[in-house]
Image (cartoon, rainbow, N blue to C red):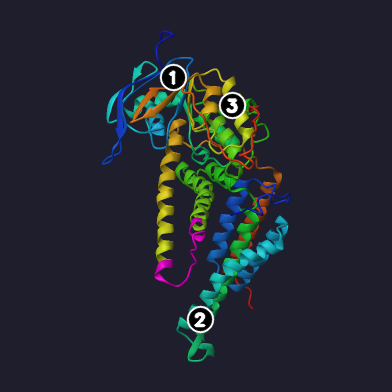
Amino acid sequence: MTAAAPIIDLKGVSFGYPGGPLILRELDFTLLPGDRVGIIAPNGSGKTTLFHLIMGLLKPLSGRMQIFGKEVREEKDFAGVRRRIGLLFQDADDQLFSPTVLEDVAFGPLNLGKSKAEALAIARRTLDFLALNGFEDRITFKLSGGEKRLVSLATVLAMEPEVLLLDEPVNGLDTRTRTRLMEILLQLTIPFVLISHELDFLTATTMTIYTMANGRIRLDQELTLHQHLHAHPLGASPHEHCPPE
Amino acid sequence: MLREPFAVGDSPLHRLDPRIRLVSAVIYSCAAALCREFPALLAALILSMALVAMARLRIAEVLKRLLVVNGLVVFIWAVIPFTFPGEALFRIGPFGAAREGVELATQITLKSNAIVLAFMALVTTMPFSTVGHALHRLRVPDKIVHLLLMTYRYIFVLEQEYQRLIRAARIRGFQPGTNLHTYRTYAYLVGMLFVKAIDRAERVRWAMLCRGFKRKFYSLHEFKAGRGSVIFLIFISAAVLGIAALELRPVPW
């Protein structure tokens, strides 16, 4: 594969549930090595569906999908894809199904055929990288929301993926965990696609930001000068605001 | 919220190999369940109490659990003695309690208390996930172990979802009563819970597929049966034989 060959290449992909309207309409999407792509779009515009199509969890009605330079169509094609692309689910409770954190993080490596010792070593290393030491024996469902998100990320990173798909990772996080997640993403060397509603998080972590409309992805690069209205007490008196830190 | 108050502890029983404890609990319960003679059943009950004492469980918590079990036993007492044919031991109004019926109800009471106490002492003294791993080591099929651990994992999520739904109903003024509206609301609630559970199951399956799940159960636990565990197994075996002896050659009352 040459350096410029796309990792993910979707052409004219359409998807809709039986009897429903099309969610994705002849969508084109390309992810190149080294890309860090953000997607910001309203709810229900098909962002999550896009991720699930790439992982082969849903099958497109039409269109062509090439991942890592290979045409993917059947379930067996996606087995390889799932090994190399990591998907962080929107709801951490979907991702953490083992009783303890260490077991959950080791689950992926064990499925990839690693020995117990190797899997444990990878799990510990991943937890270390995310500064989650001491979480090994914590019970997954008793973690806080932010902890759940970080541990979910650990379970995905433990598979040592070549690409990451992150589905609204900042949703519902407090400022501290948000900052931590931002730092972690900036440390990553692999390309990723990140869905979020928070523009400032996207601008801080990604290089290109796309938006979705009418079941398609488009690049919105035009800068539009705009104002925000806001309200607070004493708003009628002349005043100034400090710029955010 | 479901809790496991006995799972963590430092009693001699907590330190035993979980596999030994599970096997002991099963053998012992089978023996107790099959007994009919009162000396054997009383011996079993006393042994169970001894096990609970060994596990150093909080008596209040133990009694709370026994109360639930005996709540069911009360129903047995309300029905069995009065529906058994035979000579009446005593009468309540027109109903005569048959001697055989009273005996049977007493047997059931003794058995169920003995078995529940033994399980409390031997099985609830380990975290539920350990139960799963121990079962896996005892060659219980992967599917059953997965089913058990997943059920345990998602009971909490479902409980949260149930709480969310009931809260949503309450803040809109829902007050349960004996009327069609209440029944309908609960039916919706339960229906909604099923829909959510199916949805959740699909997403969890996806998450597992994404991490290369191949229907195999891997266990990171290592169990070691130390000397204490072996001694305990011998002790339980002896106790079971003792109970069997009392059952087969009952001492006269």
Q: Is residue B135 above or below residue A23?
A: below
Q: What separation in Å lies between label 2 and label 1 (alpha carbons)?
A: 83 Å
What is the secondary structure assignment of the residue under circle 2? helix
What is the secondary structure assignment of the residue under circle 1? loop
Q: Is residue B179 covered in magenta?
A: yes
Start-end of magenta stretch:
B168-182
Mark 3 lies on residue: A182
Q: Main SS type for the magenta part?
A: loop
Mark 3 or 1, nearer chain start:
3
Mark 1 lies on residue: A221
Q: Is residue B83 covered in magenta?
A: no
Instruction: Name the spot of residue B100 as percent of width and height, x first.
Output: 51, 80
Mark 2 lies on residue: B81
Residue B200 showing in the rendered view? yes
Chain where mark 3 sits:
A
Q: Is residue A35 above or below residue B3?
A: above
What is the secondary structure assignment of the residue under circle 3? helix
Q: What separation in Å lies between label 3 and label 2 (alpha carbons)?
A: 70 Å
Amino acid, disc 1:
Gln
Residue placed furthest toward the top = A2
Closest to the observer, B240 or B50 = B50
Amino acid, disc 3:
Met
